Image (tube, helix red, strand yellow):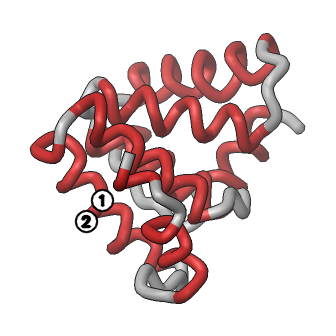
Amino acid sequence: MDTEKRIQKLFAGVSSTLKRTDPEFEGIITNFAQGEVVEANKLTEKEQMLCILSALLGCQGMGEFRNMLHAALNMSIDPIAIKEGIYQATAYLGIGRTYDFLMMANQVMEQHGINSNSAILRRISMSGICRR
């Protein structure tokens, strides 16, 4: 899939002013993150998105995490896997660094029609992740 089509698919419904305010920066992001990196890696789309979200959690990149979360959900990445990543990051980053990401993820998931309180997502809390 060519880079422009991939970006349209990933970020459908996500608004950004970068193209208008900082076209050079937007070009760097597009060419590197959605071009070179995608072509060079051997990960599945799911693995790639979960790695990106985890890295953004680790570096506290809240804004880009939000953008990539929209993209992950547009790609039908399992919301359980996404939330599980946030839960597991808490052991390494601390509650103070993951809580806001969890709250924002719940909001984004609701925008995508995913009920964060559904029985499916509650399976995570029953899986023992938080009790280790």
Image x and y of residue 28, in percent: 50, 17
Question: Is 12 on the left or on the right of 86, as rendered?
Answer: right
**Of the numbered discs in the image, which one, if any, rests on residue 103?**
2
Question: Is 63 on the left or on the right of 79, as rendered?
Answer: left
Q: Nearer the viewer, residue 21 or 82?
A: 82
In the depicted structure, whether residue 91 falls above or below residue 129: above
- Residue 41: name its quadrant: top right
**What kind of element bears circle 1?**
helix
Q: Quadrant of the C terminus?
A: top left
- Furthest residue toward right: 1
Cβ atoms at labels 1 and 2 below 8 Å apart: yes
Residues packed near mark 2 inside 10 Å, few (<14), some (14 to 19) or many (20 plus): few
Residue that appears at 84% across and 19% down: 42
Residue that appears at 34% across and 48% down: 17
Q: Amino acid at mark 1?
A: Leu
- Residue 120: name its quadrant: bottom right
In the depicted structure, whether residue 70 falls above or below residue 59: below
